[in-house]
Amino acid sequence: MSFSGSDIQAELAFAAQSAQGEEPPGEQPGIGPYRLAWRRLRRNRVAMVFGVIFILLVILCLLAPIYSQDVAHIGPNTGNLTGQIKVGGKLEYVLSLQGIPIGPTWDIHHYFLGADTNGRDVAVRLLYGGRSSLYIGVVAMLITMVLGTMLGIIAGYFRGWIDAVISRVNDLVWSYPAVLLGITLGTVLNVRGLWIFHSTTLLTTALVVGFVYIPYVVRPIRAQVLTLREREFVDAARQQGLGNIRIMFGEILPNVASTIIIFVPLMLANAILLEAALSFLGAGVQAPNSSWGTMIGAGLQVFPGAFHTVLAPGVMLVLAVMSVNIFGDGLRDALDPRSKAAI
Amino acid sequence: MARFVTRRLLTMLLMLFAISVVTFVLFIVALPGGNPAAMIAGRLANQAEIHLISVRYGFDKPIYIQYVNTMANIFDGSAFSYQQGFNVLSQLGGDAPATLSLAIGAGILWLLSSIALGTLAAIRSGKYTDRVLTVLSMVGVSLPPFLLGSVLIQYVGYKASLIPLGGYVSITHPLQWLWHMLAPWFTLSVLFIGFYSRVLRGSILDAMGEDYVRTARAKGLSERKVLVKHVLRMSLLPIISLWGLDIAQVIGGGAILTETVFDLHGIGWQAAQSIGNFDTVTLLTIVMITALSVVVIGALIDILYAVLDPRIRLT
């Protein structure tokens, strides 16, 4: 399905008017493509449910400081190596004498999901770790989408040597396995520090993850722009004397918008997964920060005694990625109902 | 045709050269592995000895000479790891059986399962079976291998004692080998099955609407024959080219996560070790192997496509 720029402008104008509570004068205008897609999406109950689950996960992780301070009364990095807590009326050590941490107590105030090997509260760390994972996922996705879209449009619009350079660099990045490239860049940046920050931040990992996936967006956008630039409305814009920048971002960009929207959840899911993989291998988020990936990696080091320290972040990770994927699948069906192909 | 093939092969060589330069700069220049001469000389060496070694191995030469030397060493098999002290190629040769066992076994498993599941989902499109398979494939693509692997090890391996807790046994003990490879094969396959079966389902549904399929039906072929001889033949092409590239990545150490979690000492496991040790030469070699297999298989697929489909422009 392709939209022309004027369709979208009409849709925006219509939306603006209805927002002001005014019916447009004259005859009833047709329903815009995005409004139609939104209607189809709303009818897809599975996609909507998983969309809501993801939003709830985000809210839960944003509430981490409140849970930490007001409910659990323990910070994410507060260890408790020798303490005892009351579970079901009797006192138990947080860490057994063999160093095995206590499992889930299911008591919302103390070690709801158990402790890790340093006696830290897994539930509190889970929420703080989720903040890192989701933050990196979103920032990396934005980096991928913005740079990927810009490069794709520029390559497809100008063609010639600009296209050749962008496409070859693209192929170059593509021929590395994503995880291998990710850990290499992650290790280099984590050891040397990012030049602006002189130390490692969550942004380091976000940059690495975002960079790795850029080619996956450039290719389809470029292919689409290659055909779009031959269309009449681009000629018309050029006849009106619009410059290249205006044509690229004013005329062509709105026409690849549905592809971009489809890629957003897909790239978000991939970014969260790659961040977890890098952090699991030690090339992602560095202490004192934590993420679901670092928690899983740390949990596996006390195998087999404390599997709840692996399972808790693992379930959150899969739930987050799966809900983004299923919502994204519904979004694609809604925006492009003719395409049955899935990614 | 010959011109197209030559052109494609030349591009491939240029690509490999570019990859090797980028990787070299990234690893040798940007990764602070310490002074390699000091590392070889050991802790008790004095300045003169370190200088002697750095002259002997060419660490005092300009960077492009070092590049040429390193590449020459990698290709003639004399490169050795400054950090871990082994000959890189023979070490990776020792790692290859584990990786090849993983890649070939899992590759067959995920290709056959996704053809079966994708076809099933397409012919039952919109029905209950299709929906269940869609949800399952969504779960599959959302499961990171290191998590699925550790869950299998904990519950099926440790609690139920049905599978070993990891490690690789040489294929000279076929039963032990099979027993050790089952869980890794499954873990690596799940991710790909979810993705491939969705792609195949889509391309079968697209092909169903094509004219040649209507013609096949019109001339009275059974539904089964139409599906196998006409629909699947076309729909399998994209799947097989994807499969080629993914297998190439796995062989080149791309299954880092699966190999790490199951403690399979293969090329991916070695890559993870090398990163931990800042072992740049080993890492460089592994990346070159991966890039080589990806680029070669990519070029083969392009040529194969051009042979199979005359509509592709040979420019």
Image (cartoon, rainbow, N blue to C red):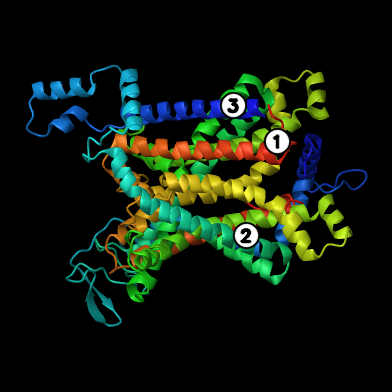
Query: Which residue is disc 2 drawn over?
Result: B115
Residue A188 x/y as whole percent: 34, 35
Q: State the residue at coordinates (63%, 63%).
A: B116
Identify which amino acid the numbered label 3 is placed on.
Thr
Name of the residue lying farthest toward the bottom: A89
Q: Label 3 belongs to which residue?
A: B6
According to the picture, the residue beneath numbered tag 1 turns out to be: A224
Q: Residue at x 47, y 58 (%)?
A: B105
Q: Label 1 vs label 3: CA separation?
A: 29 Å
Q: Chain of mark 1?
A: A
Question: Residue A170 appears at what percent x and percent y?
Answer: 54, 32
Asked whether the residues under the numbered discs 1 and 3 touch, taking CB atoms below 8 Å apart as contact, a structural biologist would say no
Residue A96 in picture, x, y percent from top left: 20, 71
Q: Amino acid at mark 2?
A: Ile
Q: Do the residues at pointers 1 and 3 share their chain?
A: no
In which image quadrant can residue A49 be found?
bottom right
Question: In the rendered view, would you say B29 is above or below A272?
Answer: above
Asked whether A292 or B264 is in front, the reply is B264
Q: Secondary structure at mark 3?
A: helix
